[in-house]
């Protein structure tokens, strides 16, 4: 069942929204649940569209242009020929996949001057939302008196699986994706359906000196001068249906393509984002925040800081290494710096004090008749969060050093072991996946990372736990992790693609052989310890799930007028607000936009982060902005601020003006409000976006690619 604004559900007891005043709020709003109060506030801020022109799955609307780009980003359709704009960092892995020493698109950029020159990107998908259905009542009707929270979750999981299978059977379409997602801490469920397009081609990418200008130094910072954009195109079959790549496919004709504005914006103008924010924890109690800061973020900061320093040194010394590791480094560094900023922001903004005040208010309410049913919620949450803290820290350390991050050889060994014994198509798929991994892997570099990661990990384990990982290292190498790493990479076949792939194809590589391999032994010992720690953590799952669900429901019952938007879960959301600067500290005031003057001020020839191509420097120095100049400021505006509410996953989200026209692409939050995933800070929290006019300037003047400009509906 499709939902439009006209069919929007009004929220009841648990999900009611109160009256709103005309300012930005913490709101990642479900578009099908926008109510009269939301729309009145949007109008007061300057919004001028009819509701069903903003969102409708029954007819063309602005929201129809917004897509899930890849596995964790947003994009926007900007032409009737399936042209998609997203961030440079969202397209980074695609750009990297096509790059080589001879064709270094990361360094030099990529410009296609015809459809024929557009490059297919294997594995890249674009998803369009096609249906949203509230299935809460249907799920609850099938529950069979669960005796515990875990049994309740188990029943719900099975019910959802059955509903998804039934819907897939009804649709009979391999290019549809059906999921069921919990909202409002598990108090509501929606079935979401997407059209999945698998023929996506790279059209335009600026050089990293534009698309990543500022690098790690400027990441999460303002003022910002990053041209964070890339351009792709969705292709479809001749009958305009989703299709796997085929040479006869044609550009997709979307239901709606967004108009692009050359008019711009000014301070106080209406701004809204529509995108797919990944995850927030706005209702987490204070003990959960302490756990996040001390047992997750701090460990990530430690381990990734060590690894990234090793990677960075090698990348700076060799072009081929830089190409291989650029995407991995960017992804690792992004969340590393985010964790640093989050911990800093949570402390500086005294978020824990506010959460504790909320908990005290809730605890007092549970002593009344109305709240007595929730009396055990906070005590059980506190006990669960505190009880799991130490093991959560150990698991994070294992993941960041051996299991999922840090050294690559241990998780690679597990993947090789999985492939042994597979036959036919399954084996071919496993080999193909391994070859993709090996393409961007350097054993010589990982050899340097392994001992560093082992040294980090040892700090987080008890002496008894350390024996699981370090027994051989301590007994045979006197605890010397450097000597142990040398032994692993000398005696293991896992780091070497030719040995592994040849063994898998010929069938000569056996489980017995791999189990005696030193890399596999390390991987297995890490897996054993991880399993042990996870088993201890599972005993807290029930209290956390039960407590989070009832804490949300109880707080809403306690204060039904309070607005409590659902946490982000990578489904489509809208945020509305205004173009606005901010004051990060006393006597400091940030403007709402930046200009090329700032690019030239930061420009540093030879710098990894602040270098520019000579021809682009000349373009900026010339100062001829043409039709992309702002009529009021007389400048080319590079990036701008709005007080919209975003998080990871929103990258690439279009920023729309009051008439639903694209004025920019959101790509970052600001350093002073990195705590925003846990608590929205209206005075400080800002969305950083690249101005669409700067995007078009780069395409037209640097890329000399007028065909893309001509495709747009430009106002």
Image (cartoon, grey):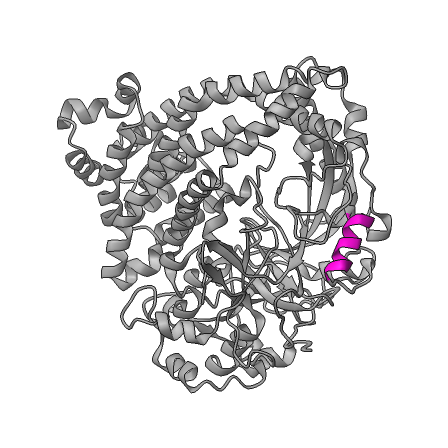
Q: Estimate the x, y position of residue 218 in percent, counting from the top left.
A: 40, 59
Where is residue 638? Give x, y as percent: 50, 71
Q: Is residue 460 visible?
A: yes
Q: Residue at x 46, y 33 (%)?
A: 292
Quarter in which the C terminus is drawn = bottom right
Q: Residue furthest front?
A: 587
> Is any part of residue 249 visible from this angle?
no
Question: Residue 440 at what x, y percent from top left?
Answer: 35, 53
> In this picture, is 143 found above or below 97?
above
Q: Is residue 43 magenta?
A: yes
Q: Which residues are magenta?
A: 34-45
Q: Is residue 280 left or right of residue 588?
A: right
Q: Is residue 711 above or below residue 573?
A: below
516 or 683: nearer the viewer: 683
Q: Main secondary structure of the magenta part?
A: helix
Quadrant containing the N terminus in the rendered view = top right
């Amino acid at each position: 069942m499709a939902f439009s604004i006209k069919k929007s559900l009004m929220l009841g007891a648990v999900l009611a929204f109160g009256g709103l005043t005309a300012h930005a709020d913490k709101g990642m709003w479900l578009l099908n649940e926008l109510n009269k109060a939301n729309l009145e506030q949007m109008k007061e801020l300057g919004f001028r569209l009819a509701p069903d022109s903003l969102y409708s799955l029954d007819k063309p609307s602005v929201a129809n242009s917004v897509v899930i780009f890849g596995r964790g980003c947003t994009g926007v359709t900007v032409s009737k020929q399936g042209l998609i704009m997203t961030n440079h960092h969202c397209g980074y892995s695609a750009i990297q996949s096509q790059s080589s020493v001879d064709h270094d698109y990361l360094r030099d950029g990529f410009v296609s001057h015809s459809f024929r020159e557009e490059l297919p990107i294997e594995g890249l998908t674009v998803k369009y939302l096609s249906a949203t259905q509230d299935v809460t009542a249907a799920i609850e009707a099938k529950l069979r008196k669960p005796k515990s929270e875990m049994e309740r979750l188990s029943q719900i999981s099975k019910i959802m699986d059955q509903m998804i299978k039934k819907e897939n059977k009804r649709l009979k379409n391999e290019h549809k994706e059906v999921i069921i997602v919990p909202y409002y801490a598990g108090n509501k469920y929606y079935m979401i359906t997407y059209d999945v397009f698998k023929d996506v081609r790279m059209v335009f990418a600026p050089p990293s000196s534009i698309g990543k200008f500022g690098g790690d130094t400027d990441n999460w910072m303002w003022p910002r001068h990053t041209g964070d954009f890339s351009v792709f195109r969705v292709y479809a079959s001749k009958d305009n249906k989703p299709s796997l790549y085929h040479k006869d496919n044609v550009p997709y004709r979307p239901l709606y393509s967004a108009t692009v504005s050359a008019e711009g914006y000014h301070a106080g103008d209406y701004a809204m984002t529509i995108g797919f924010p990944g995850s927030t924890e706005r209702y987490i109690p204070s003990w959960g925040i302490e756990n996040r800061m001390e047992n997750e973020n701090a460990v990530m900061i430690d381990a990734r800081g060590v690894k990234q320093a090793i990677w960075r040194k090698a990348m700076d010394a060799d072009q081929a290494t830089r190409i291989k590791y650029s995407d991995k480094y960017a992804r690792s560094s992004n969340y590393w710096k985010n964790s640093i900023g989050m911990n800093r922001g949570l402390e500086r903004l005294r978020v824990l004090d506010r959460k504790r005040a909320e908990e005290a208010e809730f605890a007092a309410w549970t002593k009344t008749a109305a709240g007595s049913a929730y009396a055990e919620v906070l005590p059980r949450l506190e006990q669960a969060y505190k009880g799991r803290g130490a093991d959560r820290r150990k698991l994070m350390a294992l993941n960041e050093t051996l299991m999922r991050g840090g050294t690559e050889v241990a998780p690679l060994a597990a993947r090789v072991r999985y492939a042994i014994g597979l036959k036919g198509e399954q084996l071919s798929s496993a080999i193909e996946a391994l070859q993709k991994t090996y393409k961007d892997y350097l054993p010589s570099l990982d050899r340097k990372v392994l001992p560093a990661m082992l040294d980090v990990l040892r700090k987080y384990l008890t002496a008894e736990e350390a024996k699981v990982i370090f027994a051989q290292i301590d007994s045979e190498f006197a605890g010397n992790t450097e000597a142990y790493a040398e032994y692993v990479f000398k005696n293991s076949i896992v780091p070497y693609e030719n040995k592994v792939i040849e063994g898998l194809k010929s069938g000569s590589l056996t489980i017995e052989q791999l189990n005696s391999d030193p890399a596999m032994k390390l991987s297995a010992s890490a897996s054993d310890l991880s399993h042990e720690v996870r088993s201890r953590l599972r005993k807290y799952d029930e209290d956390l799930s039960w407590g989070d669900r009832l804490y949300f429901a109880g707080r809403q019952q306690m204060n039904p007028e309070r607005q409590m938007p659902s946490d982000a879960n990578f489904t489509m959301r809208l945020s509305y607000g205004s173009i606005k600067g901010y004051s990060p500290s006393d006597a400091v005031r940030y403007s709402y936009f930046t200009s090329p003057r700032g690019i030239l001020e930061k420009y540093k020839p030879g710098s990894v982060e602040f270098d520019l191509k000579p021809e682009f420097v000349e373009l900026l120095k010339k100062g001829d902005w043409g039709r992309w100049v702002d009529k009021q400021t007389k400048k080319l505006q590079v990036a701008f601020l709005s007080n919209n509410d975003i998080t990871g996953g929103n990258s690439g989200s279009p920023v729309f003006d009051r008439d639903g026209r694209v004025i920019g692409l959101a790509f970052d939050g600001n350093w002073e409000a990195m705590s925003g995933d846990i608590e929205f800070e209206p005075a400080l929290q800002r969305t950083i976006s690249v101005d669409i006019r700067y995007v078009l300037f780069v395409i037209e003047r640097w890329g000399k690619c007028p065909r893309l400009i001509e495709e747009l509906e430009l106002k």
